[in-house]
Protein backbone atom coordinates (compact mmCIF):
# COMPACT_ATOMS: atom_id res chain seq x y z
CA UNK A 1 0.00 0.00 0.00
CA UNK A 2 1.48 3.37 -0.95
CA UNK A 3 1.77 6.01 1.73
CA UNK A 4 -0.45 8.38 -0.27
CA UNK A 5 -3.43 6.00 -0.22
CA UNK A 6 -5.70 6.38 2.79
CA UNK A 7 -5.66 3.33 5.05
CA UNK A 8 -8.88 1.32 4.80
CA UNK A 9 -11.27 2.56 7.43
CA UNK A 10 -14.28 0.30 7.78
CA UNK A 11 -17.25 1.49 9.87
CA UNK A 12 -17.53 0.09 13.39
CA UNK A 13 -20.33 -2.43 14.01
CA UNK A 14 -23.67 -0.91 15.03
CA UNK A 15 -24.99 -0.46 18.57
CA UNK A 16 -27.13 -3.25 19.98
CA UNK A 17 -30.73 -3.34 18.84
CA UNK A 18 -31.84 -2.58 22.41
CA UNK A 19 -29.60 0.47 22.74
CA UNK A 20 -31.13 1.75 19.52
CA UNK A 21 -34.75 1.39 20.60
CA UNK A 22 -34.69 2.84 24.13
CA UNK A 23 -34.30 6.60 24.27
CA UNK A 24 -33.08 8.89 27.06
CA UNK A 25 -35.41 10.11 29.77
CA UNK A 26 -37.73 12.94 28.69
CA UNK A 27 -37.58 14.24 32.27
CA UNK A 28 -33.82 14.65 32.00
CA UNK A 29 -34.31 16.46 28.69
CA UNK A 30 -36.78 18.84 30.32
CA UNK A 31 -34.42 19.40 33.25
CA UNK A 32 -31.74 20.44 30.77
CA UNK A 33 -34.06 23.00 29.11
CA UNK A 34 -35.21 24.36 32.45
CA UNK A 35 -31.81 24.65 34.12
CA UNK A 36 -32.05 28.46 33.99
CA UNK A 37 -32.08 29.60 37.63
CA UNK A 38 -35.17 31.78 37.15
CA UNK A 39 -37.30 28.76 36.22
CA UNK A 40 -39.52 27.40 39.00
CA UNK A 41 -39.14 23.77 38.20
CA UNK A 42 -41.98 21.45 39.14
CA UNK A 43 -40.62 18.94 36.61
CA UNK A 44 -37.67 17.32 38.36
CA UNK A 45 -38.17 14.84 41.16
CA UNK A 46 -35.51 16.45 43.28
CA UNK A 47 -35.50 16.31 47.08
CA UNK A 48 -35.16 19.80 48.60
CA UNK A 49 -31.40 20.40 48.88
CA UNK A 50 -31.68 22.81 51.83
CA UNK A 51 -33.10 19.94 53.89
CA UNK A 52 -30.13 17.65 53.33
CA UNK A 53 -28.66 16.94 56.75
CA UNK A 54 -25.17 18.23 55.99
CA UNK A 55 -24.14 18.09 59.64
CA UNK A 56 -25.46 14.61 60.34
CA UNK A 57 -24.28 13.08 57.08
CA UNK A 58 -20.91 14.82 57.40
CA UNK A 59 -20.54 13.46 60.93
CA UNK A 60 -21.42 9.93 59.77
CA UNK A 61 -18.77 10.05 57.03
CA UNK A 62 -16.13 11.57 59.35
CA UNK A 63 -16.82 8.89 61.92
CA UNK A 64 -16.22 5.96 59.54
CA UNK A 65 -13.20 7.61 57.95
CA UNK A 66 -11.62 8.33 61.32
CA UNK A 67 -12.54 5.11 63.10
CA UNK A 68 -12.38 2.49 60.35
CA UNK A 69 -10.58 4.03 57.35
CA UNK A 70 -9.05 0.76 56.20
CA UNK A 71 -12.46 -0.85 56.03
CA UNK A 72 -14.33 2.17 54.69
CA UNK A 73 -11.97 2.68 51.76
CA UNK A 74 -11.55 -1.01 50.90
CA UNK A 75 -13.48 -3.31 48.55
CA UNK A 76 -16.47 -4.92 50.24
CA UNK A 77 -18.85 -7.84 49.73
CA UNK A 78 -21.38 -7.75 46.91
CA UNK A 79 -24.32 -8.35 49.26
CA UNK A 80 -23.50 -5.23 51.25
CA UNK A 81 -21.95 -4.15 54.55
CA UNK A 82 -23.27 -6.32 57.40
CA UNK A 83 -23.91 -3.29 59.64
CA UNK A 84 -26.10 -1.66 57.00
CA UNK A 85 -27.98 -4.84 56.16
CA UNK A 86 -28.65 -5.49 59.86
CA UNK A 87 -29.79 -1.91 60.49
CA UNK A 88 -32.12 -1.97 57.49
CA UNK A 89 -33.48 -5.39 58.39
CA UNK A 90 -34.41 -4.07 61.85
CA UNK A 91 -36.16 -1.07 60.23
CA UNK A 92 -38.13 -3.19 57.79
CA UNK A 93 -39.07 -5.59 60.59
CA UNK A 94 -40.25 -2.68 62.76
CA UNK A 95 -42.43 -1.57 59.84
CA UNK A 96 -44.29 -4.88 59.84
CA UNK A 97 -42.29 -7.23 57.64
CA UNK A 98 -40.05 -9.63 59.58
CA UNK A 99 -36.69 -9.43 57.79
CA UNK A 100 -33.19 -10.77 58.46
CA UNK A 101 -30.01 -9.05 57.33
CA UNK A 102 -29.42 -11.94 54.91
CA UNK A 103 -32.75 -11.28 53.18
CA UNK A 104 -31.38 -7.99 51.83
CA UNK A 105 -29.05 -7.05 49.01
CA UNK A 106 -27.65 -3.51 49.11
CA UNK A 107 -27.84 -1.80 45.72
CA UNK A 108 -26.48 1.36 44.13
CA UNK A 109 -29.79 3.19 44.40
CA UNK A 110 -33.04 1.33 43.94
CA UNK A 111 -32.61 2.03 40.23
CA UNK A 112 -29.87 -0.58 40.21
CA UNK A 113 -32.20 -3.04 41.92
CA UNK A 114 -34.53 -2.69 38.93
CA UNK A 115 -31.68 -3.40 36.50
CA UNK A 116 -30.51 -6.40 38.51
CA UNK A 117 -34.02 -7.81 38.63
CA UNK A 118 -34.39 -7.36 34.89
CA UNK A 119 -31.14 -9.26 34.34
CA UNK A 120 -32.11 -11.99 36.80
CA UNK A 121 -35.70 -12.48 35.63
CA UNK A 122 -36.19 -11.35 32.05
CA UNK A 123 -35.32 -12.81 28.68
CA UNK A 124 -35.90 -10.75 25.52
CA UNK A 125 -39.56 -11.06 24.55
CA UNK A 126 -40.78 -11.74 28.10
CA UNK A 127 -43.82 -9.78 29.19
CA UNK A 128 -43.79 -7.27 32.04
CA UNK A 129 -46.94 -5.65 33.41
CA UNK A 130 -46.81 -2.10 34.74
CA UNK A 131 -49.15 0.54 36.08
CA UNK A 132 -50.27 3.00 33.45
CA UNK A 133 -48.83 5.62 33.93
CA UNK A 134 -45.58 4.14 35.29
CA UNK A 135 -42.21 5.33 36.67
CA UNK A 136 -40.23 6.28 33.56
CA UNK A 137 -36.85 4.77 34.35
CA UNK A 138 -38.52 1.43 35.09
CA UNK A 139 -39.93 1.52 31.54
CA UNK A 140 -36.36 2.17 30.37
CA UNK A 141 -34.97 -0.80 32.33
CA UNK A 142 -37.61 -3.20 31.02
CA UNK A 143 -37.18 -1.84 27.49
CA UNK A 144 -33.41 -2.34 27.64
CA UNK A 145 -34.00 -5.91 28.80
CA UNK A 146 -35.95 -6.50 25.59
CA UNK A 147 -39.21 -7.06 27.46
CA UNK A 148 -42.69 -6.50 26.09
CA UNK A 149 -44.21 -3.97 28.48
CA UNK A 150 -47.99 -3.82 28.93
CA UNK A 151 -49.97 -1.37 31.05
CA UNK A 152 -52.62 -2.73 33.40
CA UNK A 153 -55.86 -0.71 33.42
CA UNK A 154 -56.57 0.94 36.76
CA UNK A 155 -58.18 3.84 38.58
CA UNK A 156 -57.27 6.30 41.33
CA UNK A 157 -56.58 3.34 43.65
CA UNK A 158 -54.06 1.68 41.33
CA UNK A 159 -54.26 -1.38 39.06
CA UNK A 160 -57.62 -3.10 38.74
CA UNK A 161 -57.27 -6.68 40.14
CA UNK A 162 -59.84 -8.17 37.73
CA UNK A 163 -58.11 -6.63 34.71
CA UNK A 164 -54.79 -7.79 36.14
CA UNK A 165 -55.99 -11.38 36.51
CA UNK A 166 -57.29 -11.38 32.93
CA UNK A 167 -53.98 -10.03 31.57
CA UNK A 168 -51.98 -12.53 33.60
CA UNK A 169 -53.96 -15.44 32.19
CA UNK A 170 -53.85 -14.11 28.64
CA UNK A 171 -50.31 -12.71 28.40
CA UNK A 172 -48.37 -14.93 30.84
CA UNK A 173 -46.18 -12.08 32.17
CA UNK A 174 -43.18 -12.82 34.34
CA UNK A 175 -43.54 -9.85 36.59
CA UNK A 176 -45.73 -6.98 37.65
CA UNK A 177 -43.97 -3.76 38.60
CA UNK A 178 -45.77 -1.53 41.12
CA UNK A 179 -45.13 1.60 43.16
CA UNK A 180 -48.08 1.11 45.51
CA UNK A 181 -47.35 4.02 47.86
CA UNK A 182 -47.23 7.66 46.67
CA UNK A 183 -46.56 6.48 43.14
CA UNK A 184 -44.27 8.21 40.70
CA UNK A 185 -45.76 9.86 38.64
CA UNK A 186 -49.31 10.04 40.10
CA UNK A 187 -48.79 10.30 43.86
CA UNK A 188 -51.61 7.79 44.36
CA UNK A 189 -51.58 5.04 46.99
CA UNK A 190 -53.11 1.60 46.62
CA UNK A 191 -55.48 0.85 49.53
CA UNK A 192 -54.99 -2.28 51.67
CA UNK A 193 -57.87 -4.26 50.17
CA UNK A 194 -56.56 -3.66 46.64
CA UNK A 195 -53.10 -4.80 47.73
CA UNK A 196 -54.56 -8.00 49.12
CA UNK A 197 -56.41 -8.62 45.85
CA UNK A 198 -53.24 -8.02 43.81
CA UNK A 199 -51.22 -10.34 46.08
CA UNK A 200 -53.89 -12.98 45.65
CA UNK A 201 -53.72 -12.75 41.82
CA UNK A 202 -49.95 -13.30 42.05
CA UNK A 203 -50.48 -16.24 44.42
CA UNK A 204 -53.14 -17.89 42.25
CA UNK A 205 -51.55 -17.41 38.85
CA UNK A 206 -47.82 -17.44 39.53
CA UNK A 207 -46.28 -14.01 39.01
CA UNK A 208 -43.41 -12.01 40.44
CA UNK A 209 -44.36 -8.66 41.93
CA UNK A 210 -41.72 -5.95 42.23
CA UNK A 211 -42.94 -3.57 44.95
CA UNK A 212 -40.88 -0.39 44.63
CA UNK A 213 -41.21 1.85 47.69
CA UNK A 214 -38.85 4.83 47.70
CA UNK A 215 -41.51 7.26 49.01
CA UNK A 216 -43.42 5.33 51.70
CA UNK A 217 -41.78 7.08 54.65
CA UNK A 218 -42.78 10.51 53.34
CA UNK A 219 -46.35 10.41 54.67
CA UNK A 220 -48.04 13.74 55.57
CA UNK A 221 -51.47 12.44 56.55
CA UNK A 222 -53.44 9.22 56.90
CA UNK A 223 -52.38 5.76 58.02
CA UNK A 224 -49.52 3.69 56.70
CA UNK A 225 -50.73 0.88 54.39
CA UNK A 226 -48.94 -2.47 54.82
CA UNK A 227 -46.59 -3.58 52.03
CA UNK A 228 -47.86 -6.11 49.49
CA UNK A 229 -44.77 -8.08 50.48
CA UNK A 230 -46.33 -8.52 53.94
CA UNK A 231 -49.48 -10.25 52.65
CA UNK A 232 -49.87 -13.99 53.28
CA UNK A 233 -48.73 -15.94 50.23
CA UNK A 234 -46.42 -13.13 49.07
CA UNK A 235 -43.22 -14.43 50.70
CA UNK A 236 -41.88 -16.32 47.71
CA UNK A 237 -42.95 -13.92 44.96
CA UNK A 238 -42.80 -10.29 46.04
CA UNK A 239 -39.56 -8.33 45.80
CA UNK A 240 -39.51 -5.19 47.95
CA UNK A 241 -37.25 -2.27 47.00
CA UNK A 242 -36.20 0.59 49.25
CA UNK A 243 -33.97 3.62 48.85
CA UNK A 244 -32.02 6.18 50.85
CA UNK A 245 -32.51 8.75 48.10
CA UNK A 246 -35.67 10.44 49.33
CA UNK A 247 -35.10 10.08 53.08
CA UNK A 248 -31.37 10.82 53.30
CA UNK A 249 -29.76 11.97 50.02
CA UNK A 250 -29.87 10.68 46.43
CA UNK A 251 -26.19 11.48 45.91
CA UNK A 252 -25.07 8.63 48.13
CA UNK A 253 -26.73 6.22 45.66
CA UNK A 254 -27.86 3.55 48.09
CA UNK A 255 -30.90 1.33 47.96
CA UNK A 256 -31.79 -2.24 48.82
CA UNK A 257 -33.83 -5.17 47.68
CA UNK A 258 -35.51 -7.86 49.73
CA UNK A 259 -36.10 -11.03 47.74
CA UNK A 260 -36.38 -14.80 48.13
CA UNK A 261 -32.99 -16.46 48.28
CA UNK A 262 -32.61 -17.86 44.75
CA UNK A 263 -33.61 -14.57 43.16
CA UNK A 264 -31.43 -12.57 45.53
CA UNK A 265 -28.46 -14.76 44.63
CA UNK A 266 -29.07 -14.22 40.93
CA UNK A 267 -29.26 -10.46 41.57
CA UNK A 268 -25.98 -10.63 43.50
CA UNK A 269 -24.27 -12.29 40.53
CA UNK A 270 -25.68 -9.59 38.23
CA UNK A 271 -24.42 -6.97 40.67
CA UNK A 272 -20.93 -8.46 40.71
CA UNK A 273 -20.89 -8.03 36.95
CA UNK A 274 -22.27 -4.48 37.19
CA UNK A 275 -20.20 -2.85 39.95
CA UNK A 276 -18.84 -5.52 42.37
CA UNK A 277 -20.50 -3.74 45.28
CA UNK A 278 -21.96 -0.40 46.30
CA UNK A 279 -19.49 2.13 47.75
CA UNK A 280 -18.21 0.87 51.11
CA UNK A 281 -17.73 4.28 52.66
CA UNK A 282 -21.27 5.32 51.77
CA UNK A 283 -22.70 2.10 53.17
CA UNK A 284 -20.89 2.47 56.48
CA UNK A 285 -21.85 6.13 56.79
CA UNK A 286 -25.47 5.27 56.00
CA UNK A 287 -25.41 2.47 58.59
CA UNK A 288 -24.30 5.00 61.22
CA UNK A 289 -26.85 7.55 60.01
CA UNK A 290 -29.72 5.08 60.55
CA UNK A 291 -29.58 6.03 64.25
CA UNK A 292 -30.77 9.56 63.48
CA UNK A 293 -32.73 8.89 60.29
CA UNK A 294 -36.17 8.90 61.92
CA UNK A 295 -35.65 12.36 63.38
CA UNK A 296 -34.50 13.66 60.00
CA UNK A 297 -37.44 12.09 58.17
CA UNK A 298 -39.83 13.76 60.65
CA UNK A 299 -38.39 17.17 59.74
CA UNK A 300 -38.56 16.50 56.03
CA UNK A 301 -42.14 15.28 56.35
CA UNK A 302 -43.33 18.40 58.09
CA UNK A 303 -41.71 20.69 55.51
CA UNK A 304 -42.85 18.66 52.51
CA UNK A 305 -46.38 18.46 53.92
CA UNK A 306 -46.57 22.28 53.96
CA UNK A 307 -45.31 22.39 50.40
CA UNK A 308 -47.94 19.92 49.27
CA UNK A 309 -50.58 22.09 50.92
CA UNK A 310 -49.24 25.19 49.18
CA UNK A 311 -49.53 23.43 45.84
CA UNK A 312 -53.04 22.18 46.58
CA UNK A 313 -54.06 25.70 47.59
CA UNK A 314 -52.74 27.28 44.39
CA UNK A 315 -53.96 24.75 41.85
CA UNK A 316 -57.63 25.80 41.52
CA UNK A 317 -56.60 29.22 40.21
CA UNK A 318 -53.72 27.89 38.08
CA UNK A 319 -55.32 25.09 36.10
CA UNK A 320 -58.02 25.64 33.48
CA UNK A 321 -61.69 25.14 34.36
CA UNK A 322 -62.59 21.45 34.20
CA UNK A 323 -59.15 20.21 35.35
CA UNK A 324 -58.92 17.51 38.02
CA UNK A 325 -56.05 16.52 40.30
CA UNK A 326 -55.44 14.29 43.28
CA UNK A 327 -54.50 14.97 46.88
CA UNK A 328 -51.53 12.68 47.60
CA UNK A 329 -51.17 11.72 51.26
CA UNK A 330 -47.38 11.78 50.90
CA UNK A 331 -44.46 11.46 48.51
CA UNK A 332 -43.32 14.11 46.07
CA UNK A 333 -45.73 14.20 43.17
CA UNK A 334 -49.20 15.24 42.21
CA UNK A 335 -50.99 14.29 38.99
CA UNK A 336 -53.36 16.58 37.11
CA UNK A 337 -55.63 16.10 34.11
CA UNK A 338 -56.59 19.15 32.10
CA UNK A 339 -59.69 19.21 29.91
CA UNK A 340 -59.34 16.85 26.92
CA UNK A 341 -58.56 19.61 24.41
CA UNK A 342 -55.24 20.39 26.17
CA UNK A 343 -52.04 18.60 25.07
CA UNK A 344 -49.49 19.12 27.84
CA UNK A 345 -46.54 18.12 25.63
CA UNK A 346 -47.43 20.70 23.00
CA UNK A 347 -48.10 23.35 25.67
CA UNK A 348 -44.84 22.93 27.59
CA UNK A 349 -42.66 25.33 25.51
CA UNK A 350 -45.25 28.10 26.07
CA UNK A 351 -45.31 27.35 29.77
CA UNK A 352 -41.50 27.33 30.03
CA UNK A 353 -41.51 30.84 28.49
CA UNK A 354 -43.22 31.88 31.73
CA UNK A 355 -40.27 30.43 33.70
CA UNK A 356 -42.07 27.45 35.14
CA UNK A 357 -42.01 23.75 34.16
CA UNK A 358 -43.90 20.48 34.64
CA UNK A 359 -43.49 17.02 33.10
CA UNK A 360 -46.09 16.16 30.45
CA UNK A 361 -47.88 12.93 31.29
CA UNK A 362 -47.52 11.18 27.90
CA UNK A 363 -44.04 9.60 28.33
CA UNK A 364 -45.13 7.81 31.51
CA UNK A 365 -47.63 5.62 29.66
CA UNK A 366 -46.84 2.11 28.47
CA UNK A 367 -50.14 2.04 26.58
CA UNK A 368 -52.11 4.82 24.92
CA UNK A 369 -51.12 8.07 26.62
CA UNK A 370 -53.59 10.53 28.07
CA UNK A 371 -52.04 13.65 26.57
CA UNK A 372 -53.95 16.04 28.83
CA UNK A 373 -52.11 14.87 31.98
CA UNK A 374 -49.07 16.30 33.75
CA UNK A 375 -46.90 15.62 36.79
CA UNK A 376 -46.00 18.27 39.33
CA UNK A 377 -43.30 17.82 41.98
CA UNK A 378 -44.23 19.80 45.09
CA UNK A 379 -41.22 19.31 47.40
CA UNK A 380 -38.33 21.21 45.81
CA UNK A 381 -39.53 24.81 46.29
CA UNK A 382 -40.71 26.82 49.28
CA UNK A 383 -44.45 27.53 49.63
CA UNK A 384 -43.93 31.10 48.32
CA UNK A 385 -42.08 29.84 45.28
CA UNK A 386 -44.77 27.24 44.70
CA UNK A 387 -47.45 29.93 44.83
CA UNK A 388 -45.52 32.07 42.37
CA UNK A 389 -44.79 29.06 40.13
CA UNK A 390 -48.47 28.23 39.97
CA UNK A 391 -49.31 31.82 39.01
CA UNK A 392 -46.86 31.51 36.12
CA UNK A 393 -48.32 28.12 35.21
CA UNK A 394 -51.76 29.70 35.06
CA UNK A 395 -50.43 32.36 32.67
CA UNK A 396 -48.61 29.77 30.56
CA UNK A 397 -51.73 27.66 30.21
CA UNK A 398 -53.56 30.71 29.00
CA UNK A 399 -55.47 31.50 32.19
N1 LIG B 1 -38.22 3.98 41.82
C1 LIG B 1 -38.99 5.06 41.75
C2 LIG B 1 -40.48 4.89 41.74
C3 LIG B 1 -38.43 6.34 41.70
O1 LIG B 1 -39.23 7.40 41.61
C4 LIG B 1 -37.02 6.46 41.73
C5 LIG B 1 -36.32 7.79 41.67
N2 LIG B 1 -36.94 8.84 41.14
C6 LIG B 1 -36.26 5.30 41.79
C7 LIG B 1 -36.89 4.07 41.85
C8 LIG B 1 -34.76 5.33 41.78
O2 LIG B 1 -34.27 5.90 42.92
P1 LIG B 1 -32.80 5.70 43.45
O3 LIG B 1 -32.04 4.90 42.44
O4 LIG B 1 -32.27 7.06 43.63
O5 LIG B 1 -32.95 4.93 44.73
Image: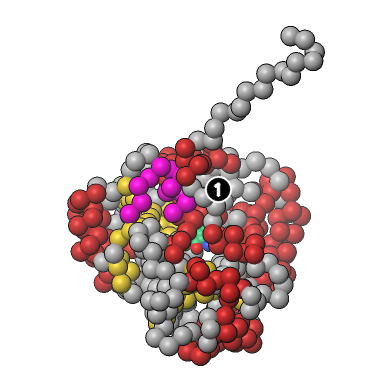
The residue located at (55%, 71%) in the rendering is 348
Q: Residue furthest front?
A: 4
Position in image of residue 92 (x %, y %): 45, 63
Which residue appears farthest toward the right when viewing the image? 3
**What percent of the width, then of the height, locates residue 118?**
42, 45
The residue located at (44%, 54%) in the rendering is 139
Q: Which residues are magenta?
A: 139-150
Closer-to-camera residue (146/262): 146
Magenta stretch: includes residue 141: yes
Quadrant of the drawing holding the N terminus: top right
Q: Quadrant of residue 297?
A: bottom right
Kind of element beneath mark 1: loop
Please tell me whether residue 155 is drawn above or below residue 3 in the rendered image.
below
Q: Which residue is mark 1?
A: 80
Which of 129/374 is in front? Answer: 374
* Vertical arrangement, residue 30 with respect to residue 225, above or below: above
Q: Residue 274 at what x, y percent from top left? A: 55, 40
**Residue 357 visible in this rendered orientation of the protein:** no
Kindly identify the residue that appears in the image at 23 percent across and 53 percent down: 168
Residue 346 among magenta residues: no
213 to the left or right of 108: left
| Horizontal side, residue 192 vs residue 19: left or right | left
Q: Nearer the viewer, residue 396 or 258?
A: 396
Amino acid sequence: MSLAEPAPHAPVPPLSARAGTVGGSPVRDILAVTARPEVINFAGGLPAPELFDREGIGAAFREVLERTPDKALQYSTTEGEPALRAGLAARVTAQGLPTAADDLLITTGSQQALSLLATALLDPGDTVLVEDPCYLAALQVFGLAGARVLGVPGDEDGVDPAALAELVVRERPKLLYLVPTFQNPTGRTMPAARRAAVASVAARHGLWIVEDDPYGELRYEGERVPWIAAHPGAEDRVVLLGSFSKVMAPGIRLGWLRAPEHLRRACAVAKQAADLHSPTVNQLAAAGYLDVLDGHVDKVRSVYGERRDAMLAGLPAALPEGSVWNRPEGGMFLWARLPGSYDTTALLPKVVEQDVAYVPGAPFYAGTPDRSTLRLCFVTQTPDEITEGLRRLGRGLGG
